[in-house]
Image (spheres, rainbow, N blue to C red):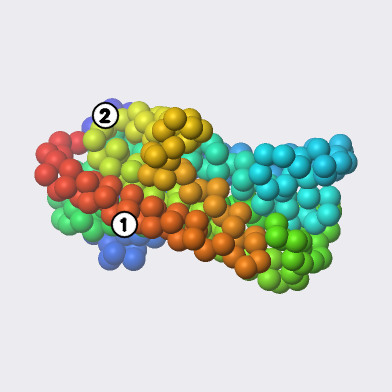
Amino acid sequence: MSAVDTAVPAATTGTRRAGAMPLRFFASELSLIGRRRRNQAGLAVLAAVPIIIAVAVKMANPDPSEFAEGGPNFVGSITSNGLFVALAALALEIQLFLPIAVAAVAGDSVAGEANVGTLRYLLTVPVHRTRLLAVKYAAIVVGAFIATVTVAGTGLLVGLVLFGGGDLTLLSGTTIGLGEALLRLLAICLYMTVCLSALGAVGLFISTLTEQPMGATIAITMLTMASWILGVIPQIDWLHPYLITHWWNSFGDLLRDPVAWDPLRSGLLSAAAYIVIFLSAAWARFGSRDVTS
């Protein structure tokens, strides 16, 4: 098949997507993200981690005291309640796997369209550039939520099957029922989605700077890793509150009684600042960009 033959369907697809109403355009964008094999494979990897954790703990049957140091004792508490599988998986995957999942979607958002030659067709129908960015970012946010819920849902399911459920003992020692525990798990997923959406805003901006989606994805991932590394250097502790990843682990404060709201509030404000700044930067960059592909 010639380059002309492949360009025509791509142009037709871009025109059809752009000509749709905003909700249909958004649904089309979600469908496009969901159909990509790499995104499907990424969700499979995200879901595999809590399964591996649960099976490993079930086989090892560890002493909870072995995990007493180094933060919330999620892994050591798994044997007492299967819901801790979801919490342990979220705590582990927020360090790398979940950011990579968001980076893959955000990096491909604009750069991917430019790379395959459909971006200019989306803009000549016409689709207003602001609306295009809004749809792209909304799809990134939904993708972040789906990724987070995939981890939590898989962990919850396999945890309940292998270890059972029942009342949950919070980090502060208070015991709550399973229903309230599930609500807190949902709140944790929403908090982590907001944090990852801030990374998605950074990724959308980076995606407007290049036509290579893989390069954008790598740049976003490296930025995340750099933030984690800087966050453990005590000599620059003045910088830590401003790092994008600094407040991500504060989700554990939702498992206290009463809930420690100050770190959560700071995390949400930090995420909101990143979202506003980098969405504005993406809009400024994309609004003045000469799109040739």
What is the x, y in percent for residue 59? 87, 38
Position of 288 with respect to 46 (left or right) is left
Quadrant in the picture for residue 236: top left
Question: Quadrant of the image for the N terminus?
Answer: top left
Q: Nearer the viewer, residue 114 or 131?
A: 131
Q: Secondary structure at mark 2?
A: helix
Amino acid at dot 2? Ala
Q: Which mark is residue 74?
A: none
- Relative depth, front residue between 163 and 136: 163
Residue at image point 48% right, 49% down: 247
For label 1, the residue is: 135
Q: Is residue 152 visible?
A: yes
For image coordinates 67% across by 52% down, the residue present is 87
Looking at the picture, how far across and down is residue 148, in whole percent? 55, 52
Check disc 1 and give the amino acid type: Val
**Mark 1, secondary structure of its residue:** helix
Mark 1 crowdedness (10 Å alpha carbons): few <14, some 14-19, many ≥20: many
Residue 190 at x, y = what percent?
51, 60
To which residue does mark 2 refer?
Answer: 3
Horizontally, residue 14 falls left or right of residue 99, namely left
Quadrant of the image occupied by residue 68: top right
Out of 285 and 255, give the one closest to the viewer: 255
Does the rendering let one see residue 48? no
